[in-house]
Amino acid sequence: MFWWAVSFVAQIPDDLRASVVTIQKDGRDFGQAVLVESGLYLATGSSVGSIKALTSEKKTITLRQVAVDELTQLVLLRGDANVPGIPLKILQPGQTGPIMVVGTQGVQRGQLVSTKRLGVVGAKRRYVPLSEVRVAGSVGDLKDSAFFQGRSLAGFVISVVDTPLVPTQQNTFGAQQANNYGPAPMSVVYVTGPDVMQRLLNAFHAGESKVTYPLLGIMCRDASGMGAEVASVTPGSAAATAGFRPGDIIVNFSGVLINNQFDFAQTLYRLKPGEKATVTLKRGDRTIIVSPTLGKSED
């Protein structure tokens, strides 16, 4: 387990400052919007219409919603393309290591543990690829925070789990070790993964104002060996029409080898509604190939 001293600084680091604006609500700081393309900012807040934001130069600008992912409450906002700022890249999947957490309370250091976590989000219990970050602090400290690794945007908070932090390693991430310390709060934070953020940008560039998802109609769990086991099939879904059954083991999905439920969810997430998938199933001693046409869901 990680240990480091809580380290807040008053300002966003120089290399990020011009790329991040502070969302204002009722005269108070409410969160961050991050420049990812010229005039385009990513933020959280579901459907927000238009909002005011404060630049690093203390200039008030208006941001207008142009696309939304209702499932993850991620929004894409358009601002003035003439406002100074260098767009940040979206973090590549597979990265780990030290991370910077920028929130209304200040800036903290943390550790990106994995970009390969899996969450079940929304009323329809959709699988979504998430990233796991560990930071010192409580839920209040991390609300509406944005996460960065170097000049890359790593995500926004989806959920936070508080847990005691036991010191086992000193000077992690280059932080100064306190002279006297004991167990302290640590938050395990799940944030929007790279695939989630990229999907919203792709939807906007395709002329869509809402993110749509491919819908197969199954719930999965890790199989006892290789693959993702079908736990349930929704009646009338694409999976039901194609002949999926509970207990089937998905071992290949549209050319991708499936080792576990994360592989399945990530592969499905990258496909498009209406696309025909080719799925290899193990059913007892038999190998079956089915070709469902994926349905569509906005949440």
Image: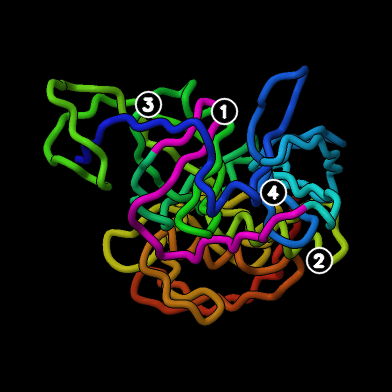
In this view, the residue in front, 167 or 39, is: 39
Q: Give the residue number, with chain letter if any, for mark 2.
A: 205
| Residue position for label 1 | 104
Marks 3/4: CA–CA distance: 24 Å
Label 2: few (<14), some (14–19) or many (≥20) C-alpha neighbours in 10 Å = few
Q: Is residue 239 above or below residue 14?
A: below
What residue is drawn where x is 53% and y is 49%? Answer: 14
Q: Position of residue 298 (x, y in %)?
A: 76, 49
Q: Nearer the viewer, residue 83 or 50?
A: 83
From this viewpoint, is residue 213 visible? no
Numbered mark located on residue 137 in the image: 3
Labels 1 and 3: the sequence-earlier one: 1
CA gap between label 1 and label 2 equals: 30 Å
For mark 3, give the secondary structure. loop
Q: Which mark is residue 42?
A: 4
Q: Earlier in the sequence, mark 3 or mark 4?
A: 4
